[in-house]
C-alpha cells in the first residue's frame, strides 16, 4: 500500500511536472493500489502545508486522469445516502451530455429563430441543474460534517468551493435563457458558450472526484449509526425533482 508521504511527493511532482505522459507512467506503477482515505489525507496535509486549495483543485483533476483509483463497489442498499447521491449524479451527467449536444446545434445556427427547440431544451436543463442545489446542500449539511469531525477536512473544502462557483454559473445560465429576447444573438451565444464551457467540464470533474474519492472515503470512515442519522437529515432537507424513487 502506498504511504501518505509517497503520495504527497507524487502530488507535488504532478504540480511541477509539465510532461504528464512521463508522470503518468510513473504514477501507474506507483499507485496500483491507492486507498482513497490516504489520498484525502495527503491532499489535506498539502493544503495545511500551504498549497493553494485552488491549485490542488486543478491538480485533483489532473491526478484523477492520471491515477488509476481502484473503483470499489461496496454493497449498499438503494436508500443509503451514497446510493441516492450517486443516482442523482447519473441524472446530472445525462443532462450535461444533453447540454453539450444542444450547444453543438446552437453553434451551427445563426439566429434565435433557428434555435427555438434548443432554447427549450437548455431551459429545462438549467432548471434541473439549479434544482440539483438540494443535492449539494445534502452533501454540505449532512455528509461533510461527520467527515470533518473525523479530521477529513480537505476534500469537503474543495467540494464546497466548487459548489459555490458552479451555483453562480448555473443561476447565470437560467437567467441568460430567461432574458435571451433582450439580447443580441451573437452576444447571447458567446455568453452561453462561456457558461456551458465552464459548467460541463467542471461539474463532470466534480462528480468524478466525489464518486471516486470522497464517497469511497466516507464509506470507509463512517459508521452505520452515522449513515442512519444522515438519511434522516437527507429526508429533512429534501430531494431534487429528478431524484429516482427510493
Ligand atoms: Fe458535490
Ligand atoms: Fe455530488
Image: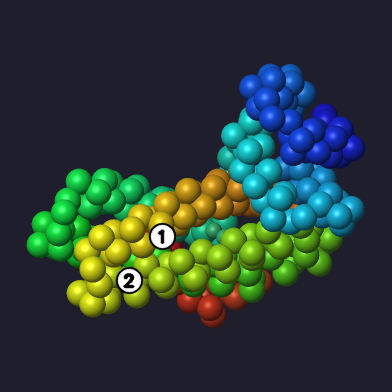
Look at the numbered disc 1 and say if its residue's Cβ is closer than 8 Å to ligand 1: no
Which of these two is toward me, 243 or 181? Answer: 181
What residue appears at the point 49 percent right and 59 percent down from the top-left corner? 84
The span from disc 1 to disc 2 (Cα, nearest Å) is 10 Å
Of the image marks 1 and 2, the number of the one nearer the N terminus: 2
The numbered disc on residue 176 is 2
**Left of 81 or right of it: where is 200?**
left
**Left of 213 or right of it: where is 51?**
right
- Residue holding disc 1: 195
Which of these two is toward me, 236 or 51? Answer: 51
Q: Is 120 above or below relative to 196?
A: below
**Left of 177 or right of it: where is 93?**
right
Q: Position of residue 46 (x, y in %)?
A: 84, 49
Q: Secondary structure at mark 2?
A: helix
What residue appears at the point 33 percent right and 48 percent down from the top-left corner? 100
Quarter residue 17 falls in: top right
Residue 40 visible = yes
Q: Is 171 above or below relative to 204?
A: below
Q: Is 54 above or below relative to 129?
A: above
Quarter residue 154 falls in: bottom right
Where does the N terminus fall, quadrant-wise?
Answer: top right
Residue 80 visible = no
Which of these two is toward me, 31 or 62? Answer: 62
Marks 1,2: beta carbons within 8 A: yes
Q: Residues within 10 Å of mark 2 (few under 14, many from 20)?
A: many
Q: Position of residue 3 (x, y in %)?
A: 87, 34
Q: Position of residue 188 (x, y in %)?
A: 28, 64
Q: Secondary structure at mark 1?
A: helix
Coloring scheme used: rainbow
Q: Position of residue 193 (x, y in %)?
A: 35, 55
Where does the C terminus fall, quadrant-wise?
Answer: bottom left
Amino acid at each position: 500500500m502506498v504511504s501518505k508521504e509517497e503520495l504527497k511527493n507524487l502530488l507535488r511532482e504532478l504540480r511541477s511536472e509539465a510532461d504528464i505522459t512521463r508522470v503518468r507512467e510513473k504514477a501507474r506503477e506507483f499507485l496500483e493500489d491507492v486507498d482513497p482515505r490516504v489520498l484525502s489525507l495527503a491532499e489535506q496535509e498539502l493544503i495545511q502545508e500551504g498549497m493553494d486549495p485552488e491549485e490542488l483543485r486543478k491538480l485533483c483533476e489532473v491526478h484523477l486522469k492520471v491515477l488509476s483509483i481502484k473503483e470499489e463497489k461496496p454493497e449498499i442498499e438503494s436508500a443509503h445516502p451514497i446510493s441516492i447521491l450517486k443516482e442523482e449524479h447519473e441524472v446530472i451527467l445525462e443532462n450535461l451530455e444533453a447540454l453539450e449536444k444542444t450547444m453543438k446545434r446552437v453553434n451551427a445556427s445563426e439566429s434565435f429563430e433557428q434555435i427555438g427547440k434548443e432554447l427549450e431544451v437548455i431551459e429545462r436543463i438549467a432548471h434541473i441543474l439549479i434544482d440539483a442545489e438540494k443535492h449539494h446542500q445534502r452533501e454540505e449539511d449532512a455528509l461533510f460534517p461527520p467527515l470533518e469531525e473525523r479530521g477529513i477536512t480537505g476534500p469537503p473544502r474543495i467540494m464546497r468551493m466548487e459548489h459555490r462557483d458552479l451555483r453562480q454559473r448555473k443561476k447565470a445560465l437560467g437567467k441568460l435563457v430567461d432574458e435571451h429576447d433582450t439580447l443580441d444573438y451573437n452576444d447571447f451565444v458567446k455568453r452561453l458558450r462561456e457558461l456551458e464551457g465552464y459548467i460541463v467540464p467542471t461539474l463532470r470533474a466534480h462528480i468524478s472526484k466525489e464518486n471516486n474519492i470522497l464517497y469511497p472515503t466516507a464509506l470507509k470512515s463512517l459508521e452505520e449509526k452515522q449513515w442512519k442519522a444522515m438519511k434522516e437529515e437527507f429526508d429533512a432537507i429534501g430531494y431534487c425533482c429528478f431524484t429516482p424513487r427510493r
